[in-house]
Image (cartoon, helix red, strand yellow):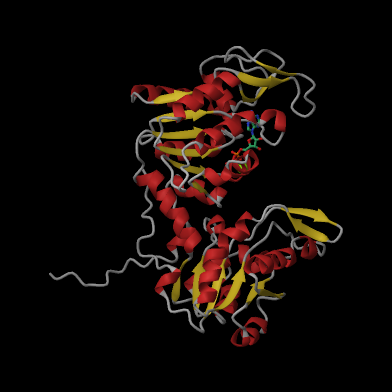
């Protein structure tokens, strides 16, 4: 069972007087990059845009702002300083915010302290990639104290990094008295808390993606609450193998077949439903698909592998989903990165989009979690019609499996404000 207690005991940015205060905002600007001769360029700025409400709010309230994030996985090689520089992010943020973004090379130097008092209302500081500092991933207290020396108020709005006990996420707020969360994390947790604690029935989970093993803890934590599981992606073949169906050379996790069999039995015993694909898009070769076919049945012939759910399955899932009141989607239905194998995932996105009303409300709560699922929703063109797309892949799964996120726990103060009378 879930052990999380949501936002209890956690302050939000609105609880503080920000005027003239040095506000350190840990954001998640870990955006996908494409390498070029002139340095890297941003291929998707969703995460930058997602942080804007908190930054704009702090600016409006007269805060002196330091923004900080990690970017990619630099390994300390000299060329990494260019490849993983925050420079393109500073430029994009400046455009979006219509403000001047001052990039500070060394977060351990005196520069932030020197610059902060003179910052004007349309200027913000952005620190260079936090992972250029060894202390970041080590959760080093020394690095945290250097950042704390120019921080009056610490705000975490980096949901996608909150499952990691790193210096900017844990050690820094440990060293700061006034601390809380921004609007992005608040919304993420409120949404995921509905999935954990207050889903409206029928509650359906669409599960797909590459591996069953990635999703087992989430399935375990939600199994009692979910009414229907709809399974696709490579995960489906492990479940089909558990029913002794032929799966050809599809991706199967042999050591998870018994888990799949046990789960099918548990779901049947509880009178709940698990839908598995009844047909598939198959190919002879994953990397060089010269033959692409659709099966008639759930079985996959020898020499072929499944790469997407088939048309009958798309229709079956669409019908089932039309009754839902709460939907959680994690894991694409096929290898959606290739257009030939994207139809299954796009059909799911379309089915979820049909809950969006003209006035912006939703007749069912539709939540998408997972980096690749979010990318599939985006590629489908229906992303704007989901009730919520989580910006944190790993963090949202860890939260849903009932784990505590270090970045939230460090901000929690559960001391009772009133002493109980004896
Ligand atoms: P998320 O990031 O949303 O949690 P996952 O990382 O679990 O999703 O899974 C995404 C990956 O699963 C995608 O790269 C996709 O190509 C792959 N995938 C989906 N269906 C199949 C399949 N039938 N065979 C192999 N890989 C698949
Ligand atoms: Mg993924």
Say which quarter of the image contains residue 100: bottom right
Q: Residue at x 55, y 52 (%)?
A: 392
Q: Position of residue 183 (x, y in %)?
A: 48, 62
Residue 164 versus residue 87: which sits nearer the camera? 87
Viewer-proximal residue among 359 and 393: 359
Where 65 sits versus 256, above or below?
below
Q: Quadrant of residue 379?
A: top right
Position of 210 with respect to 40 (left or right) is left
User: Which residue is outermost to the left?
Assistant: 422
* 38 is higher (above) or lower (below) than 152: above
Q: Quadrant of the C terminus?
A: bottom left
Residue 62 in sight in this render: yes
266 to the left or right of 146: left
Above/below status of 144 relative to 149 = above
- List x then y, in percent, for residue 238: 56, 24
The residue lying at 52 percent from left, 28 percent from top is 231
Given residues 257 and 11, the one toward you in this image is: 11
């Amino acid at each position: 069972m879930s052990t999380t207690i949501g936002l209890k005991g956690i302050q939000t940015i609105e609880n503080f007087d920000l005027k003239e205060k040095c506000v350190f905002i840990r954001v998640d600007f870990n955006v996908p990059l494409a390498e070029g001769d002139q340095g890297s360029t941003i291929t998707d700025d969703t995460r930058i845009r997602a942080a804007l409400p908190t930054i704009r709010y702090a600016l409006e309230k007269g805060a002196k702002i330091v923004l900080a994030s990690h970017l990619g996985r630099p390994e300390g090689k000299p060329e990494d300083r260019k490849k993983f520089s925050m420079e393109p992010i500073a430029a994009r943020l400046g455009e979006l915010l219509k403000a001047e973004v001052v990039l500070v090379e060394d977060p351990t130097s005196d520069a932030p302290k020197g610059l902060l008092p003179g910052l004007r209302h349309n200027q913000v500081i952005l620190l260079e990639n936090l992972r250029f500092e060894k202390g970041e991933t080590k959760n080093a207290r020394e690095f945290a104290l250097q950042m704390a020396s120019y921080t009056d108020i610490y705000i975490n709005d980096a949901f996608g990094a909150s499952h990691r006990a790193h210096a900017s996420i844990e050690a820094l707020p440990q060293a700061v008295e006034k601390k809380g969360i921004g609007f992005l994390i608040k919304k993420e947790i409120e949404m995921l808390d509905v999935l954990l604690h207050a889903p409206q029935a029928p509650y359906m989970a669409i599960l797909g993606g590459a591996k069953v093993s990635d999703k087992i803890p989430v399935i375990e934590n939600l199994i009692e609450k979910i009414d229907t599981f709809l399974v696709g992606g490579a995960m489906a073949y492990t479940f089909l193998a558990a029913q002794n169906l032929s799966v050809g050379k599809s991706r199967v996790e042999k050591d998870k077949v018994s888990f799949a069999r046990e789960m099918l039995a548990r779901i049947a015993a509880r009178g709940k439903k698990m839908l598995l694909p009844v047909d598939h898009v198959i190919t002879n070769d994953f990397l060089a698909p010269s033959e692409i076919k659709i099966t008639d049945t759930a079985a996959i012939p020898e020499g072929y592998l499944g790469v997407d759910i088939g048309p009958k399955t798309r229709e079956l899932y669409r019908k089932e989903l039309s009754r839902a009141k709460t939907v959680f989607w994690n894991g694409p239905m096929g290898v959606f990165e290739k257009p030939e194998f994207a139809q299954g995932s796009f059909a799911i996105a379309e089915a979820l989009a049909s809950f969006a009303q003209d006035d912006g409300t939703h007749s069912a709560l539709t939540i998408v979690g997972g980096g690749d699922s979010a990318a599939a929703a985006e590629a489908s063109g229906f992303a704007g019609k989901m009730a919520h797309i989580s910006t944190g892949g790993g963090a949202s799964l860890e939260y849903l499996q009932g784990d505590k996120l270090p970045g939230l726990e460090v901000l929690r103060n559960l001391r009772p404000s009133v002493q109980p009378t004896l």
